[in-house]
Amino acid sequence: MSQFGLLRKRRFTALFLTQLLGAFNDNLYKNALVIFITFKAASDASGRALLITASAGLFILPFFLFSGWAGQFADRLEKSRMIRHVKAAEIGIMLLGAAAFALESVPLLIAILFLMGAQSSFFGPLKYGILPQLLRAHELVAGNGLIQMATFIAILAGMILGGVLAAGGGVVPVATSVVSVALVGWWASRFIPPVAIADPGLKTDRWFWRPMIRGIAFAREDAGVFAAVLGVSWFWFMGATFLQLLPAYGRDTLGGDANVVILLLTCFTVGIGIGSLLCARFSRNRINLGLVPTGAAGMTLFALVPMLVGPSAASNADPLLTVSAVLGVPVNQAVIASFIGLSVCGGIFIVPLYTYVQANSDLRRRARVIAANNILNAMFMVISAVLTLAALGAGMSIPAVFAGAGVLNLVFCAGVIRALTRFESQKPCTGDSGPASSDTRYHGDR
């Protein structure tokens, strides 16, 4: 069966659509909020920057607070039922968000963003924890590739639509859209089949830091799994670094207008989706860790291009340049191609690592390991923001920051690859070693 043949299987398609719609809705709301703050809510640049930064922080904060509990609930309870509850909560949150947009209340809009982060923190361990129970061993790489592809395309589509609706149509289209998408996402989740409970006797901790610490400890019990977890988190470090700087790079270095920024974001996110799909083809639906060094080397190589080729010949243009004008400069073509190449290599890098974590984690603790991974992902994204601000504050140009991230990528990934190579020989993980034993998986084939 081809990779896209999985989309004909209800056991996968229901989860696929649920995840796609959730990622789309998160980014639709977030970007609509950013546009609202930028053009309507704040009267000065410093106020806008403060509100947008606070919004981003409040969305990430729940991953630190609740991911530990989310992993425990996902291991203790039946996952498909929990997903439906989480998606039902999304409907309630988006109804509140619609009311906040109607009232044009910035404090309430930002508070809703915190609730969205909380909902996403509970959904993460469920979606990646249930995936190995819904798929056969030879389908797991392909399934992860499709999930990653859908996630990043949904992120891009949600960002674009949220910006367009907020800028052009006012609050009513935004409010209607977020509630409608939440309803469709809940409907899709109803078709996810039930799976066996991983650890029904698990007791939930009272304090949030205990499951967080224990989840990281569980991940560290298998050095290969922990190395893969760190590799996944590093991918989010690189992604956050580039995504937060691409708008400024398009505006200030390439001299482009808003459409140029959209082009850069589109190239980057679609490239990750393409790389995720190519990974399954290259690995022939087996967990092939040999693709990890290839992806890492490609990310470093392409991260150096914006600095090596020099600034755009059309920089600092007034008025701002259109897409066709920017693409008319050969240097710019090389830079944009490098962003595509970097993101394709990122997709190739991430899919084997995510699949390795799922296939090699103890079934009874898999969701808690994935929750720990989510915590580390959030931590690495925060570190990315801090280092980027420090680098820019020290006078580094954006191409220099890209190049610095590429050098760090080479060093960090070398350690991850060394650990994986060392422990893979002790605990092999191939497409033939199923993601879970047969008595823990969904047995249907629809």
Image (cartoon, helix red, strand yellow):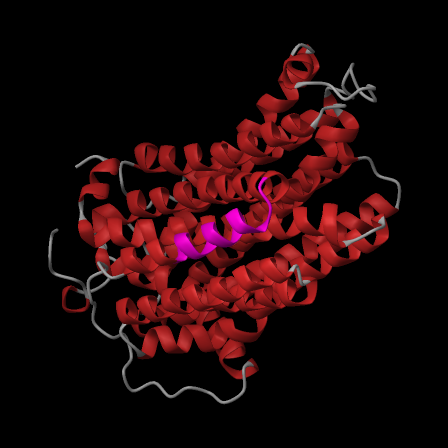
Q: In this view, does 365 lie above or below 129?
A: below
Expressed as whole percent of the image width and height from the top left, the position of residue 248 reads: 74, 36
Q: Is 68 on the left-hand or right-hand side of 360? A: right
* Residue at screen point 52% across, 64% down: 116
Identify the residue at image location x=79%, y=50%: 389
Q: Residue 171: say if magenta.
A: yes
Q: Nearer the viewer, residue 279 or 11?
A: 11
On the question of residue 425 being in view, the answer is no
* Quadrant location, the N terminus: top left
Classified by dominant secondary structure, the portion drawn in magenta counts as helix
- Magenta span includes 426: no
Residue found at x 40% / y 78%: 72
- Numbered disc total: 0
Residue 250 location in percent, x, y?
A: 71, 29
Instruction: State left or right for residue 84 relative to residue 354.
Output: left
Where is residue 336 drawn, in percent x and y? 61, 23
Pick the residue in front: 358 or 323.
323
Q: Give the range drawn in magenta.
A: 169-182
Give the x, y percent position of residue 84.
Answer: 31, 67
Above-or-below relation of 280 to 187: above
Look at the image and tell me whether residue 291 can be seen. Answer: yes
Q: Looking at the image, which residue is at 71% across and 26% down?
A: 257
Which residue is more in the foreground, 160 or 218? 160
Q: Is residue 144 above or below residue 336?
A: below
In depth, the one of 6 and 266 nearer the eye is: 266
Which quarter of the figure has residue 424? bottom left
